[in-house]
Amino acid sequence: MKRSAGPFEILEILGEGSFGTVCVARVTGDPLRRKVALKILKGAYTRNSKILNRTRDEARLLSRISHPNIVRVERLMDVGGRPVVVMEHVQGPSLDQLLLRFKEGLPASIAIEVVRQMSIALHVAFNEAVAEDGRPMRVIHRDIKPSNVLLTIHGEVKVVDFGIARGEFEGREADTQSVVMGSRPYMAPERLDGVSDNPSVDVYSSGMSLFELLTGRTMSLSINPVTHDQAMNRQLGFLTVPGMPTPALEELRAVIRKMCAYDRDLRPTSLEVARDLEQLLYAINNEQRVSLEEFARTTVIPIYESRPKISPEEAAQNGTGDDDFYKEVTGQITGSTGTKTGGGNLIKWTPYAFVTLLAVAVFGLAAAAIYKAVNNGEASAGALATESRNWATPRPPEVERDGKVNVRFHLDEDQPGSTAQVGDVRVQTSSRIRVPPGGQIVEVYYADGHTDQCRFTAEENAIVRVVFGQGISVNASSYQPCETTSPATSPAEVPR
């Protein structure tokens, strides 16, 4: 692969999300050969107007925010109809990656200080970031969780991924009304009711993240108001902080309890959270208190340097499907042409060559199918939210004769002919099944001959959804990948 023929030399593939790939690149025209991060939309979504608009809006939004705890965006480029966001290169793991090393939670002083700085960043994004017309943009992140916060090798906290953020600014392309998007269990309960978002949804997510950072546990709360607080009080009992006096520990539990209150009017503001956490930080005795800089030097740097490094060549060999586009990014972009979009630092580059149009045409058929799947999924978000709420609402106990639980199962409607098997139960496109509670394996048989094997935990009235290419989701949680095997057993050979 030709890495360096334009202003960027792609060095490393940092990771892939649902819609985009993030690369580390060197600016070849810079005498200092500075590194940047490139967020590249996957080719499969180049025809999806909603995702395209969200990507452009994220870049415009972040270009107007200047805060050390929020990742900086330098500009937005357009290559062959595909947006490329040029961002600050952040050297450091995400908090969920750190938790893989700290099974019982991070050092308390680190967890508290990270969320304190994160809360200040959220306060600035909503109250102080202004658009070009001088009005506050009122930015709400809406997807705060450990994987969306990085800790750098220098001890800096960086909030990233504003892809579903809500903001008010001129030139906004995407419809940012309140929709059910985000990650359970960090999502505030009112979001599933379609209530208009306000900054308290980020406070709720911050509280859930703080508990996880302190304990290594994901706090599971009911979206039923009757049992929500009972579940939280029970799980807060697991919270212990070495070196923190009992009165301060009770105050810390009270802060998390307020942050994660079911009634959003009872939650503090992000700025109030930051002030409370600052006081609690100094309640930890000196022997147990570690600074971010020291933690970064002794712990973050070794973790970051030991990360698996994926080159563009390796990514192409693994079947990312964007090998040609990596060449296009490094070989076709030039700094000689471009028009400003929306003012400020955002520059839109439009080098439409014949080969680019041909590549887009090749992606067309595949993108059309995925476009339909994504839009249908978003259109049904409200229905799914309602169903999720019904799942959490207590129901009259049924007469259980076989010790099994009811599960609502949904297969991908855009994959006709697919069937599935859970134990000895055959699953159709959409059906309610009864299976033993606990860990289960579902095998999904697709018409093209391959099989997905997915794992989930069966609970009474759980809602399970399997989507081709995304994985399995339980009760509207984020999709978890499935294992794919090929050749697969034919659907006709599935035990009946």
Image (tube, rainbow, N blue to C red):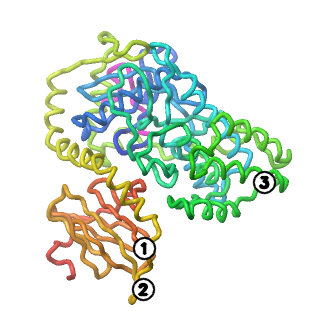
Closer to the camera in the image, 91 or 181: 181
Position of residue 300 measured from the top left corner of the image (x, y, whole percent): 64, 43
| Residues at discs 1 and 3 in contact (Cβ within 8 Å) | no
Which of the two residues, 449 or 339, is positioned nearer the viewer here? Answer: 339
| Whether residue 153 can be seen here | no
Residue at x-position 35% and y-position 39%: 20
Q: Which residue is mark 3?
A: 249
Q: What percent of the width, then of the height, locates residue 227?
A: 57, 64
SS for callout 2: loop
Residue at 18% x, 38% y is 363
Of pointers 1 and 3, the one earlier in the residue sequence: 3
Q: Which label number is shown at residue 403?
A: 2
Q: Which quadrant holds the C terminus?
A: bottom left
Which residue is at 48% across, 24% downward? 137
Q: Nearer the viewer, residue 423 or 211?
A: 211
* Type of amino acid under label 3: Leu
**What kind of residue is marked 1?**
Glu
Sort mark 2 into few (<14), some (14-19) or many (20+) by Cα contacts within 10 Å: few
Q: At numbered mark 3, what does the secondary structure look like: helix, strand or loop?
A: helix
Q: Which residue is mark 1?
A: 460
Residue 328, image quadrant: top left
What's under tag 2, amino acid-wise?
Gly
| Magenta segment | 1-14
Residue at figure coordinates x 30%, y 38% from the top left:
42
The quarter of the picture where residue 441 lies is: bottom left
Do the CB atoms of the residues marked 1 and 2 lie less than 8 Å apart? Answer: no
| Marks 3,2: beta carbons within 8 A | no
Is residue 347 visible in the rendered image? The answer is yes
